[in-house]
Image (tube, coloured by chain):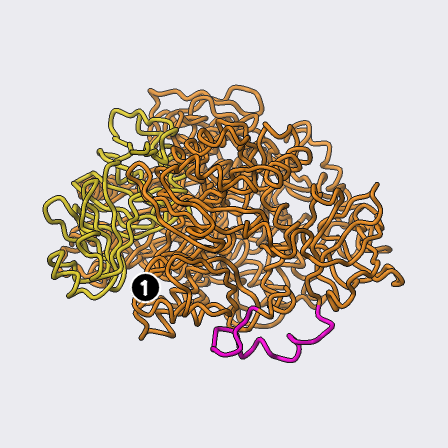
Chain colours: A yellow, B orange
Amino acid sequence: MLDRRSALASATTNHSKVLKLEEAPDFSLTQVAGEETAIAAIAGALPEKVGQAVAREERTIFCIGPRQFWFVGPAGDDIGAKLDGSAAVTPLSNGRTRILIAGAPARDVLAKGLALDFHPSAFGPGTFALAGLHHTPVLIHCIADDAFHLYAMRTFAMSVWDWLRDAAQEFT
Amino acid sequence: MTAFRRLDTGGRIDRGKTVRASYNGRALTGFAGDTLASALLAANHILIGRSFKYHRPRGLLSAGIEEPNGLFTIGAGARREPNIPATMVDLVDGLEARSQNAWPSPELDLMAVNSLAAPLFQSGFYYKTFMGPTRGAWMYYEPLIRRAAGLGAAVAAPDPDRYETRYEFCDVLVVGSGPAGLAAALTAGRSGARVVLAEQDNALGGSLLAGTSAENEAWRSKIVAEIEGLDGVKLRLRTVVQGIYDHNLAVLAESRDQLKPGPAKGQARMVLVLLRFKTIIYATGAIERPMVFSNNDRPGVMLASALSTYANRFAVAPEERAVIVTNNDGAYDTAIDLARLGVAVTVADRRPTVLAELFARTAAHGIAIFPATGVAEVEGGRAVSRVRLAGAHAVTVECDALGMSGGWSPALHLTSHGGIKPRFEEKIAAFVPGGFAAGHFGAGAVLGTFGLAAAIAEGAKAGAKAAAAAGFGKTRPVLAPEHISDRPYAIMALWTPSEGGRGKVFVDFQNDVTAKDVKIAHEEGYESVEHLKRYTTLGMGTDQGKTSNVNALALMAGHRDLAPTEAGTTTFRPPYAPLTMGAIAGRSIGHHFRPKRLSPLHDWHLANGATFIEAGPWLRAWYYAWAGASPETAYVKEMELVRKGVGLADVSTLGKIDIQGKDAAEFLNRVYVNGFAKLPVGKVRYGVMLNDDGVVFDDGTTARISETQYYMTTTTAQAGEVMSWLEYLLQCHWTGLDVHVASLTDEWAGMAVSGQKSREALQLAFPDADLSDGALPHMGCRDIAHEGVTVRLLRMSFSGELAYEVHVGAGYAQALWEHILKRAAPLGIRPYGLEALASLRIEKGHVAGLELDHRNTLDDLGLGKMASKDKPYVGKALRFRPALQAPDRWSLVGIELLEPEKKLRGGAILFAATDEIKGHGRGYITSVTWSTELGKFIALGLYQGGLTHEGEEIVCAYPLKDELTRARIVSPHFIDREGARLHA
């Protein structure tokens, strides 16, 4: 197998006692587009509208647009192969870099760059949003009380990482 | 002689905590709780600056954000910041303050000589004097004038402090924490709504902070304590709400300067909050107006309310005697405040009669009250020493300070940012908000409600309404304390100065605009308030006329015989108060200004001698150290590598799009000008797209992966545009097509293997794959598996040589790149960069971004023959407009240099050999390179009539370097016109 290299392979590590800011690799991302009924027949129930997500077993399904879904599962997830032929399946595991932001200041860090309401009542676990961070499109997903997964475009991942580290500087 | 003293007791200062700052290099001590202004006053610094034009001595006018005079440069070195009102600066240890516009010191200012030439400086003076006799005159005078007149100087060095931006959301935004604001915030907060309470001061309470009533203070403390205990209420102190924008966006600037001069690493000095609110309550209070009389700018002449604030909040009072001049009831409170502290007070009230109750209550404190009396003139050179009164009691009174009150102007600026013009309210002789948008509310003095109990009641009501409008039903309104009963407030609008003054009568202190300037503006026809502002500079500067506008507008209205409401006001715009540029920039500075897009091979390039060049957001490998130390030498060697052997280039930046669906073939057939319906699986085709106006949009290649799936590449520059265009067509026009598109630009990496040895190189890299011409012909494509990873091979060429593109999942790009370099090393393979890549295509005559500039047609670019005659495609109809088919359009040509000692230059203007060198010429050069193959400079360009002029000599003019160069029009295909190399 060829060596796989992270877009953040040469990134500077962030050190903080109160904030976890690190890459969360080893996931599989598959974009699926097509008729909901055909997809649901194979993959199970889908989120009902854009901006909603459902989590089942090891997989989270995000509805990112009309008839468009992101399936995020563990590395090697075979959902793409299962859906092939029933929908347009586009593997995107290389194209996004996933970053974990967790800890008490996580919401404060994100509020510096994302024009989203990060109050726990408005952005609790399970919520996600497609948004812009540092001029780039990202998907931000709240995975636990003060823990988030940020999906950044791979080619911008280094700049986004750099931005996050800068925003987190005060939380030592 | 004017003098102030620090009281032994009282005030909101902590006498146990001494603060050590510096003023003009000398020690300035105060107490915790002091502002720079109160500390200066306590230390008897009365004369603290010089005025803008006349360099007249000036002292503090106010105790708040409206301060026009007391501006200082704070900090040192790169941290220095000019024009900061001392009234808004918390006194902290190590604070360095310097006075401005005075040399060598405010006390002895040599530029005060300007004052003698004062008649020269009246309104319109610059325009009348320095604009002639020649147009250049202003250019000459301007720097001299600016040196003599002005405020503090900005720093040229980069600001070392950190500024941040922050997005926030709330249900109810309350602006101002005076009695109305406190009541509003708590009432809204009790409903469970998320409330932000923004206060520009360093403490909550507004006017209550300057009061003396123990009952009021008890009420304030109780309300503040309850607010602080509510989780849903967020307090923002030292935060100025700078602007209100559409869709309920407020911009707040939170200053954290009080922490210490020079914040710690990662700590922001100021945070700009972009706050989206559902509802807003303006509880912004009111600002007291000066009165207009002779020498009303002398140090020691202050707003009456400022005297109260300094006395009650900061425990700084006039030494012995004070005079209060007023046209309203409000200033009597100040008289009583000062009398209680043992100051001998005289009140001159311009109104003919004073309410008996008020008279009696005031006189009971031993205060002399002179009705029907105003100020004729203030006497004293550097500060007020005596006041000569005019009217019923025309006596001269010695004093340490003069407090003036011309009434109160509601601070309605923010209410007007959305475009609602204020209206004049006769009862209070001031402008009030002209109305509110849905979900916007006002409470307290901003509405002209000056009574404490009434303001609290209004605040509570607004708080309940705002919470309800934000979806929170039930609340318990805050009640005003029972002991308060509001007395009526009365004012008589008396705008013109009392008779008998000989000195200057100031309207706008910061800009040195006098009542006479307003009169001159009127006489010269600058009557509208907007013209008045521009002609006299009234209301400009850092205070934006917070104390001067209403007085000036009323004077102008008087000259015009209009009511103030007919004269109107100038427009209020954000920011409400001066805002440092750093706060607007936030962290968008240096390399954080914009993101950089990096190829998956970036780290390899970096480690292997690449020099980078910016291409849009991308950083691309420009050339490599192996080929040379400068781009000029390196790219030629890299071109030779490709022409004679084999090279490897990173083309991961190309746009890549996945196109799937049973109608994908039909979709592509409509999008591209050439046919795609019959493209077989396993083949690639070059295609061109037009905009719907018939002009070339982009080119690229598309490979058919299966019956229902295609792999499109676009130019690097247009990748995003093409993706949006395809989505737009599918979502808006061709909704019936079963097609899905997805961007693969980040998913796939691409590398070009180019040169006559490229097949050999790939064979070494992928020994198991059949790469023969039969198995993978020119414009063929195939996916192979390599070490468990899918590798997509596309045989196509940008350079004109036998070439392949190898695409692979971005994560595997570096491993595959290194694998190819290693295996093909015996062939001498090396990397080549963007400069060589772009030069090779010029030799081949391929158009790229410089030619695809959204202004050229297919025919202009020599691609007209590609377009299908049979099928419809986007842009087909408009492509044939007569102007787009005109034979004299500028179209693509090759250009070769005829003078070997010279150069061709991109952008050079082209002329026929016999033309006069003048004007826009007949075309221009788009792309230039040294041709390794031909041994000379060649270029692509656009030329009127195009290749009908093939073989003709032309002149390339480059006016920037004053060059004229002879050249010849040739075919743009400089090498291998038959394409033999591609099919090898």
Q: Tell me residue B735's x, y (percent).
A: 33, 73
Left or right of residue B979: residue B131 = right
Q: Split into 4 quadrants, where in the image is the N terminus of chain B?
A: top right
Residue B882, magenta (yes or no): yes
Chain at numbered mark 1 = B
The answer to whether residue B53 is above or below residue B457 is above
- Of the residues shown, which amino acid type is indicated by label 1? Glu
User: Closer to the camera, B654 or A138?
Assistant: B654
Which residue has dot 1 on it?
Answer: B707
**Highlighted magenta segment, given as a residue range:** B866-889
In the figure, residue B247 lies in which quadrant?
bottom left
In the figure, residue B970 lies in which quadrant?
bottom right
Q: Tell me residue B516's x, y (percent).
A: 68, 57
Give the tally of numbered discs: 1
User: Closer to the camera, A132 or B402?
Assistant: A132
Q: Tell me residue B313's x, y (percent).
A: 36, 36
Give the secondary structure at mark 1: loop
Q: Which residue shows up at 81% across the image and 62% down it?
A: B919
User: Closer to the camera, B542 or B609?
Assistant: B609
In the figure, residue B165 lies in which quadrant?
top left
